[in-house]
Image (cartoon, rainbow, N blue to C red):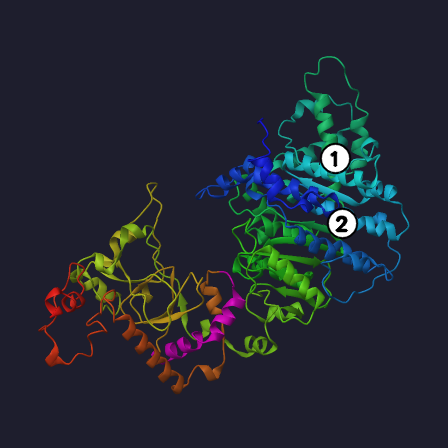
Amino acid sequence: MFTPSYHDGVIKDLIDGIPESDFDVQLEGQVEIIGWLYQYYNEEPHNAVVNINGGTVKTNDIPAATQLFTTDWVVRYMVDNSLGKYYLERNAHSELGTHLEFLLPDSLEMVSDDLDVTQIKVIDNAMGSGHILVYAFDVLMKMYAEQGYSSREASSLILENNLFGLEIDKRAYQLAYFALMMKAREYNRRALTSNISPKVYVFEDTSNINDNYFESLPVSESNIQDLKYIVSLFYDSRTLGSIIQIDKPVKTGNLRTVLTNIPQDTSLDLNNTREITYQLLRLLDIVETMQNKYEAVITNPPYLNKMNKVLKEYVKTHYKDYSSDLFSVFIWHNINMTVTNGYAAYMTPFVWMFIKSYENLRKSILNTKLISSLIQMEYSAFEEATVPINTFVLKNSSTSENGVYIKLSDFKGGMDVQKVKTLEAIENPDVDYLYRTNQSNFNKIPGSPIAYWASDNLLQDFEIGQQMDTLVEPRVGLQTGDNSLFLRQWFEVSYDKIKFDAKDISESVSSNKKWFPYNKGGSYRKWYGNYDYVVNWENDGQAIKNFKFPNGKQRSVVRNPNYYFREAITWSLITSGGFSIRYRSAGSIHDVSGMSAFSSSHDKLMNILGLMNTPIGNHVFKMLNPTINLQIGDFNSFPVLDKAIDNPEINEKVTGAVAISKNDWDSFETSWNFKMHPLIRHIDEHNRNWNGFPTQNHCNVPNLSQIFFSEDNYG
C-alpha cells in the first residue's frame, strides 16, 4: 500500500515511460503489461537463484529461476509458423496468411481441404502468464471467422476446444487464466457469466495423499489402483511439471465419474476425503491434457541445468539422451506431443544447435523430425537471459523438405533490431541472411551442427577432407584444482627458480627448479605469445598430484602428462575475440584453457598453424561452435584437404610469421626473453651509454627502459 503521486514515482513512470499502445487491448497491450510486470515482480528472486554458485535450484525456486517473458514478435513467429502454417496446409483457399505478419516465406505442402477448426488443439505446457495462448486465441478467431462462426460463438468454442495450458507456478497460472478470460470477454461480453473456463491448469504435488484416503473409498480395486498410479506419477509434480511421462493410458472419463459419485459425508472428515477428491478431479484434467496429441505445441521452455536431486534423477531416467538442460528435455518431449505432421515451436538457447552435449538431441531431430524454420538471433540480443537465443519450429515428420533459416547474428541492437531484420527477410526473401537448405546436409559435418549457412563447397570439404585429429593429437591438459595456489605470473617468483627449457618430463624431474612455464590460453593473439604464467611443478608436480578436498577426494586432475613440455600449437578455450592459434615451443605444461595439439612433425604443426590462422579457420569454427568456448571436439572436426598438409611454401611463410610475432612479444618487459626495448634497439653501439648486460629490476626484468629514460641520460 502506498500513497499515489502523479508527479513522481511509479505512476508517473507508467504514464510517461511506457507507450500508450502497450496498454491497448487491440494491440495485445494488456498481455504485454501483465507478462512484463510479473517478470519484474520475480526479478529479485530470479537473480538470487540464478546467481547461486554451484548449488541446485530448489522446487520453490524453479518458477523464479526459469520464467522469462517471451518477446511479442517471437510469440507471433512461433504461432504463425506452427498453428498458422498447419491450418494453411489444410485450407487451400484461406486468406489467413495475409494476417500472419511473421509467417516465413515458404512453399506450403497442401494436405487436405477439409479441416474442422474445432478439432485443432494448441498447448503451451510452460505457459507462464499466457502470452502465447492469448495470441493463438486471436489467430484462431480469424480461422473461425473464415469458417462462418460469429465472434461470440467462436470465443466460447476456442476456450472449450482449442487452447490448453500447463504451469508449475500458481500465480502465473492465475494470470494466464485471467488473460484468456479477458480475451474471451473482448469478443463476447457475456463470457464472464458463462460456464466455460479456459483449459489451463497448475500442477499440484500429491505428497499429501496417503493410503488412508483410498481405504475409505467405496470403489473397485482396479479404480483404486489407477488412482494410486496417478498419485505416484504426480508426487513431485511441482518439480517435474510437464515432462512427467504417463507410461500407460489412463481412462480419465471413467475415473472422473467414479470420483464425482463418491458420497460427500457432511460429518467430520478425518481423512480430508472431500478436499483430496477435488484435488484428484483437478489432477484428472491435467492427465487428460497430457495424454492428448496436439496440432501445435508452442512454448518458451524453462532453461535450467542446476537441477535438484528429484528432477535430475527423473530426467536421467526418462530423458537420458536429452538431459543436458531442462529446455532440451522440453524440445524432445514437445515434438512427441504433436500429431503426425503437427508442429512444435520453441524459443530456447541456441547451444543445442552446436555443442557436443546436445549431439544426441540434434541427431534424433535430424533423423526423425523436420526443422521447418529457425531464426538464430544475435549473441546478446535477448537481454532478459544471459544466453544466446534462437526460435524455431519442428514438424513431426521425416519428409525431405528444405527448411527456412534466418541468421541475425550480424545485427546488433537488441530484439527490436532482430524484429526489423526478420520482417525485412519476410518481405524480401532474397536477402543474404535468409537460407534454405536440406537438413540432411548437417549429417555431413562431424557432430551434426545445425550449420545451415554452410556452402556446398564446404560441405564437400567435410566429406573428402581428413579430420584434424587424424593429423595432429589435440589434448586437454592439467587442472590444478586451485590456480591461486599453484600458478604465478612469471615475474612474481624468483627468476632463478624457473625452468624455462625443459624438453620432457624427465628433465622436469631431474631439475631442482620449482616453477615451470604454464600455457593457460590467454587473450586473442596469433602465431606466438601469451607466455605469462608458471606453475609449481616441483618434484614432478608432487604438491598438485596430492591436492585433495577435505573429504579426501582428488581435487586436481593431471591429464595427458606424457604430452607436457612438448612443442605444440595452442588456442584459448575462450574465443570471444575470435579464433586465434599460436606456436608454443617445447618447455611448457598446458592446462584445460590452453588447448593444445601435438605432433612429432614440426613441419606438420607449422602447416596446420597456417591453415587455422586464415579467415577460413574462424569461419569454420563459427560454424562448428559459435559460442565463446571452443572445445577439443570442435578442433578435431575441422576438415583438412591434402594440399594444405605438405606445402613448403606455406611452411616458410608460417615460420616467418611466428618469428615476427615472437620478436614483437619479446620487445617488451612482460616477456622473460626481453633483451632490449624497440626504441633503443637501433642506437649505434658507440652511442650507447650502458655497458655489459643490463641490470635487472625487482621483477627480474632487464632495466633498460629505466636506464634509458633515467634523469642522468637527459643531457
The reply to whether dot 2 and dot 1 touch (C-beta < 8 Å) is no
Where does residue 569 sit, x and y in percent of width and height? 37, 71
Asked if residue 197 is positioned above or below residue 442 in the image, the reply reads above
Q: Which residue shows up at 18% across the image and 59% down it? A: 699
The answer to whether residue 246 is seen in the rendering is no
Question: Foreground mark, 2 or 1?
Answer: 2
| Residue that extends furthest to the left in the rendered view of this protein | 691
State the residue in front, 329 or 451: 451
Q: What numbered label is drawn on residue 686? A: none
Q: Quadrant of the C terminus?
A: bottom left
Asked if residue 706 lies left or right of residue 165, the reply is: left
**The disc labelled 2 sits on which kind of residue?**
Tyr
Asked if residue 713 lies left or right of residue 163, the reply is: left
Marks 2 and 1, how far apart at CA: 18 Å
Badge 2 element: strand
Q: Which residue shows up at 62% across the image and 36% down it? A: 238
Where does residue 31 sit, x and y in percent of width and height? 69, 43
State the residue in front, 385 or 444: 385
Label 1 sits on residue = 284
| Residue that extends furthest to the top in the rendered view of this protein | 267
Label 2 vs 1, first from the N-terminus? 1
- Dot 2 crowding, Cα within 10 Å, few <14, some 14–19, many 20+: many
The answer to whether residue 421 is seen in the rendering is yes
- Dot 1 crowding, Cα within 10 Å, few <14, some 14–19, many 20+: many
Residues rendered magenta in the picture: 602-627
Where does residue 243 sit, x and y in percent of width and height? 64, 44
Badge 1 element: helix
State the residue in front, 242 or 454: 454
- In the rendered image, residue 562 lying in the magenta stretch gets the answer no
Label 2 sits on residue = 294
Q: Quadrant of the N terminus?
A: top right
Q: How many marks can you see? A: 2
